C-alpha cells in the first residue's frame, strides 16, 4: 500500500472510531420504546406493592449491543408490550446506578430480574432474549410470583 493510500485509510478508520461513541448514544434519553419504564428501583418497588403487580427489572447499559437490540426489537414487539402491562417495568442503567446493580448482583448486561409485588426475586435471566424468549420468561415469572 502506498503511503498516501495508507494515510487515507488511517484517517477514515480514525473518523469512524471517533464517531462510534456519538452513534452509540443516539438513543434519546427516555426513548425506550412503548413500554412505560420507570427508572427508579425504589419507585418501582412502591408501585409494585401498591398495584400488587410483579416487577420486571432490566439492568442495561447504553454501550451494550444486546441491550440495544432488545430495546429496538424485543421491547417493541406487540405481544411483549401487552404482556409487560402485567408487570411494573423498571429500566436500570448500570453506569448511572451502579450501587443498585451491585446490590442486585448484576454481573452481565442485559440482566432481567423479576420480583414479586413484595420485592422477592422470583426469576433472573442474563443475556439477550428475543420476543418469544422474553414472553416465556414473563409467563414463568408470573407463575412464580403468584406462588
Image: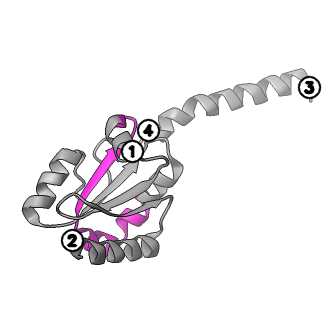
Cα–Cα gap, marks 4 and 1: 6 Å
Q: Are marks 3 and 2 in contact (CB under 8 Å)?
A: no
Name the quadrant containing residue 137.
bottom left
Q: Are marks 3 and 4 in contact (CB under 8 Å)?
A: no
Whether residue 109 is visible: yes
Cα–Cα gap, marks 2 and 1: 26 Å
- Inspect the magenta stretch and tell me whether residue 121 lies in it: no
The part of the chain drawn in magenta is 71-98
Query: Residue 140 vs residue 50: left or right?
Result: right
> Which numbered disc, 1 or 3, marks the residue that appears first in the sequence?
3
In the drawing, what numbered circle is on residue 2? Answer: 3
Decide which of 42, 32 is in the foreground and name it.
Answer: 42
In the drawing, what numbered circle is on residue 25? Answer: 4
Cα–Cα gap, marks 3 and 2: 62 Å
Looking at the rendered image, the disc whose residue lies closer to the viewer, 3 or 4, is 4
Name the quadrant containing residue 56.
bottom left
Cα–Cα gap, marks 3 and 4: 36 Å
Decide which of 51, 32 is in the foreground and name it.
Answer: 51
In the drawing, what numbered circle is on residue 86? Answer: 2
> Which numbered disc, 3 or 2, marks the residue that appears first in the sequence?
3
Residue 134, position in %: x, y? 41, 70
How packed is label 2: few (under 14 Cα within 10 Å), some, or many (20 or more)? some
Cα–Cα gap, marks 4 and 2: 30 Å
Name the quadrant containing residue 58.
bottom left
Q: In the image, is residue 63 above or below residue 90?
A: above
Residue ID for mark 1 = 27
How packed is label 3: few (under 14 Cα within 10 Å), some, or many (20 or more)? few
Amino acid at each position: 500500500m502506498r503511503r498516501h493510500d495508507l494515510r487515507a485509510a488511517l484517517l477514515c478508520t480514525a473518523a469512524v472510531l471517533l464517531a462510534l461513541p456519538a452513534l452509540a448514544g443516539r438513543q434519546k434519553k427516555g426513548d425506550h420504546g412503548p413500554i412505560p419504564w420507570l427508572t427508579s428501583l425504589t419507585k418501582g418497588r412502591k408501585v409494585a406493592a401498591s398495584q400488587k403487580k410483579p416487577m420486571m427489572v432490566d439492568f442495561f447499559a447504553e454501550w451494550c449491543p444486546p441491550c440495544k437490540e432488545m430495546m429496538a426489537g424485543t421491547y417493541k414487539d406487540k405481544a411483549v408490550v401487552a404482556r409487560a402491562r402485567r408487570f411494573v417495568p423498571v429500566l436500570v442503567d448500570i453506569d448511572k446506578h451502579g450501587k443498585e446493580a451491585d446490590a442486585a448482583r448484576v454481573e452481565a448486561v442485559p440482566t432481567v430480574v423479576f420480583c414479586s409485588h413484595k420485592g422477592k426475586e422470583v426469576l433472573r435471566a442474563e443475556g439477550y432474549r428475543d420476543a418469544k424468549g422474553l414472553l416465556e420468561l414473563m409467563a414463568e415469572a408470573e407463575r412464580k410470583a403468584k406462588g
